Image (cartoon, rainbow, N blue to C red):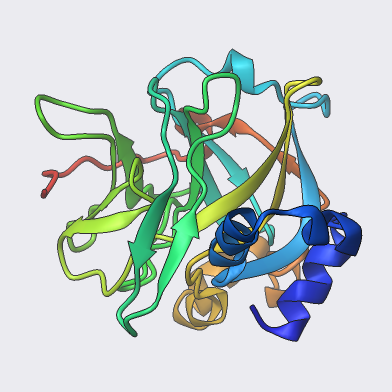
Amino acid sequence: MDRRNFLDLLAKGASLGLLLKLSPLGMLEFVRAQSSATSFQKALLVDKAGNPFKLSALKPHEPFVFAYPYAATPNILVNVDAELPPVDVKMPDGKNYRWPGGVGPRKSVVAYTSICPHGYSYAAPNLGAMGYYKPEGSRGPRMVCCAHLSAFDISKGGEVKGGPAPHALAAVALEYDAAKDEAYAVGFLGNPQFDEFFRAQQQSLRDLFRTTARAREEVTKATVIPYAEHTKVPTTCPVLG
């Protein structure tokens, strides 16, 4: 963990005293979970009325969308209807990071960027290139980019299961308040590639948001809406892996 990430973690409420109280194994897990983390402004997930979004309200396999950390970067939120334990995720440089698993009442809720790390297609409001596919047969839950058929196992930290994607899909780091049944987006695990996305989608984002500045406005409250309401033209395609 570099100094910047460590200070970011302290700023988010992980006090030095708490870190020092962790067992050696606990400290190792903490470091592994954050070693590929990118922190952004903490944002409460809210419904369309502006009230805190309750994760217990998520029905199994019904995807929702929320923009974070920028107005133009949508993520897919879904309850996969099974408890998801932490796993190690491999990156092309040989390094691993620890995906902490599902959150929510049953630890079955996950969120991932909808931006494919291959060609930066995504779940745009006008065309849903990236979508969620529920388990079928022996295949687990997937997110698939229909542009080039990259498939990601969202029960395993977003690992690539097929197609040309070079690495795992970046996962949204969710902070869950069990007492209130509320969640906050606090950053990403993996490589979300936002700068590359904004360069690749520059013209289409200007068409949607009029200016790049509006597209890159930081989200302070992340409004959660059904995928079907967010994306006017969803796509379907074969699921590899």
Marks counted in the figure total: 0
Q: Is residue 155 above or below residue 145?
A: above
Looking at the image, residue 58 lies above or below residue 219 = above
Q: Residue at x 21, y 40 (%)?
A: 236
Q: Residue 51: x and y, percent?
A: 83, 24
Residue 229 visible in the shown view: yes
The residue nearer to you, when weighing 224 against 109, is 109
- Taking depth in this image into account, of 92 and 78 the one nearest to the observer is 92
**In the displayed structure image, the side of residue 1 where residue 52 appears, left or right:** right
Q: Quadrant of the N terminus?
A: bottom right
Give me the residue at 68% from left, 83% from top: 2
Quadrant location of residue 115?
bottom left
Residue 185: % across, % down: 69, 48
**Residue at (23, 61) in percent of width and height:** 147
Residue in the foreground of this view, choosing between 61 and 223 = 61
Query: How far across and down, in percent of the image, does residue 100 sit?
Result: 52, 48
Relative side of 36 to 231, left or right: right
Dividing the picture into quarters, in which one does residue 121 lie?
bottom left
Query: Does residue 94 appear left or right of residue 162 in this picture?
Result: right
- Residue 36, position as x, y percentages in the image: 54, 71
> Which residue lies most toward the front here?
24
Q: Nearer the viewer, residue 201 or 77?
A: 77
Q: Is residue 208 visible?
A: no
